[in-house]
Image (tube, helix red, strand yellow):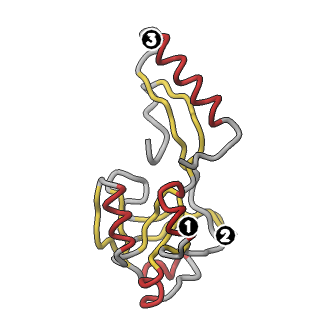
Amino acid sequence: MHGSEPRSSLLTRRICPIPFLLVGSSDYLQKNGHPKTPNELSKHVAISYHYSQFANEIFFEGPNGRETIKLTVSIRSNNTIMEYQATLASMGLAVLPEWLIADDLANQRLEVVELDYTLPTTFLYAVYTSQRYLSPKIRTFVDFLVDYFSGCVAKW
């Protein structure tokens, strides 16, 4: 689940944190400038994941507490791969999972937008409706995932 905590009517088990980074292509940032503060982001276009907490705005934690920046969205999608491809094509800035863009960061196709602010932590959850009807296989699998990812950040 990407975004906020699951509904309280569901049972959840936190698996691990998933780091997300604000990134843009090198070409996009050369043409449009490297924002230095959250307010400068409002001068840029964004590629937004439709069902996320970052659909129309970005929340940051920084020296002055929480700041919310409204985005000018050029593309809104419910497909992370499309968002990723649009970012590579210099169509705007995006908040993407680190595991997806690690190679592009290493090869300098994408750059992290460096601010003195951090994005909220996003977590991977196992979500189910009832422990009463949870099969032993699923319970064992969820236990395996929690154990496997304990103490580390998800980097698939």
Q: Say the numbered circle drawn on residue 135.
A: 3
Label 3: how many Cα within 10 Å (few below 14, some 14–19, many 20+):
few
Q: Are marks 2 and 3 in contact (CB under 8 Å)?
A: no
Q: Compute the Cα span from label 1 to label 3.
A: 43 Å
The residue pinned by badge 2 equals 64
Specify which label sits upstream in the sequence, 2 or 3.
Answer: 2
Quarter of the figure with residue 116: bottom right
Specify which label sits upstream in the sequence, 1 or 3.
Answer: 1
Q: Label 1's element?
A: strand
- Name the residue rendered at 44%, 16% in the picture: 130
Q: Compute the Cα span from label 2 to label 3.
A: 47 Å
User: Which residue is more in the foreground, 46 or 10?
Assistant: 46
The residue pinned by badge 1 equals 67
Which dot, 2 or 3, sits closer to the camera?
3
Is the residue 73 above or below the residue 142 in the image? below
Residue 36 location (% of width, % of height): 58, 82
Q: Compute the Cα span from label 2 to label 1.
A: 8 Å
Q: Is residue 152 left or right of residue 84?
A: right
Q: Label 3's element?
A: loop
Q: Say the numbered circle drawn on residue 54.
A: none
Instruction: Please tell me how many numbered marks the rendered image carries.
Output: 3
User: Which residue is more in the foreground, 4 or 28?
Assistant: 28
Q: Label 2's element?
A: loop
Which dot, 1 or 3, sits closer to the camera?
3
Is the residue 37 above or below the residue 145 in the image? below
Residue 119 location (% of width, % of height): 57, 60
Q: Are marks 2 and 1 in contact (CB under 8 Å)?
A: yes
Q: Which three-letter amino acid code belongs to the residue tagged 2?
A: Asn
Q: Which three-letter amino acid code belongs to the residue tagged 3?
A: Ser
